Image (cartoon, helix red, strand yellow):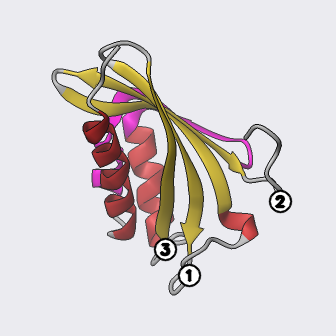
Amino acid sequence: MSVDETALRELVETVGKAWAANDGDAFADAYTEDATLTLSGDRFFAGREVIRAVLTQQFATAHKGTTLLQNITKVRPLGRDAAFVITEGGVLAPGETVPAPERAFRAIWVMVKEENTWLIAAYQNTRTADTTLPGA
């Protein structure tokens, strides 16, 4: 199974750039029409337009001026047109290079190729534990 790992990494980067620009439209455009976004704190959003509305609101309030740290730790193909990616990082407040513990998380991205374009079909994050577990 072979996927274009460069394209997957670019998609993660695109989301990070959209976040840094506080651009809810660019952020949502990285997702499939029927995507899901599950965030720590038991927040669940379904559909690109819902994701667009939520992130646009968040970029105007709680996440205004923040950026993302998204270090890719694993890329695993699930066929020619699907893959999952694991990232570690979190939300960075202005001036931070490492997220505060309450904003640090690990994320799983399920990506699919639709009409020659890689998009996010599902994203889920959870806060990072205080210590690394064996085998992690």
In the picture, the quarter occupied by the C terminus is top right
Residue type of the residue flagged with mark 1: Glu
Quarter where residue 56 is shown? bottom left
Q: Are marks 3 and 1 in contact (CB under 8 Å)?
A: no
| Residue 83 image label | none
- Tell me the residue at 48%/64% (across/down): 68
43 magenta-colored: yes
In the picture, the quarter occupied by the N terminus is top left
- Between 68 and 33, the one lying in front of the other is 68
Callout 3 crowding tier (Cα within 10 Å): few <14, some 14–19, many ≥20: some
Relative to 37, 50 lies left or right: left
Image position of 22 with respect to 73: above or below = below
For the residue labelled by badge 2, is the local secondary structure a helix, a strand or a loop? loop
Q: Position of residue 92 (x, y in %)?
A: 55, 73
| Residue range (magenta) | 24-48
For the residue labelled by badge 1, is the local secondary structure a helix, a strand or a loop? loop
Residue type of the residue flagged with mark 3: Thr
Q: Position of residue 93 (x, y in %)?
A: 56, 78
Which is nearer the N-term, disc 2 or disc 3? 3
- Tell me the residue at 27%/23% (across/down): 113
Q: Provide the residue designation for mark 2.
A: 130
- Between 17 and 57, the one lying in front of the other is 17
Image position of 33 with respect to 71: above or below = above
Q: Provide the residue designation for mark 3.
A: 66
- Between 107 and 23, the one lying in front of the other is 107
- Tell me the residue at 60%/74% (across/down): 98
Q: Provide the residue designation for mark 1.
A: 96
Q: Are marks 2 and 1 in contact (CB under 8 Å)?
A: no
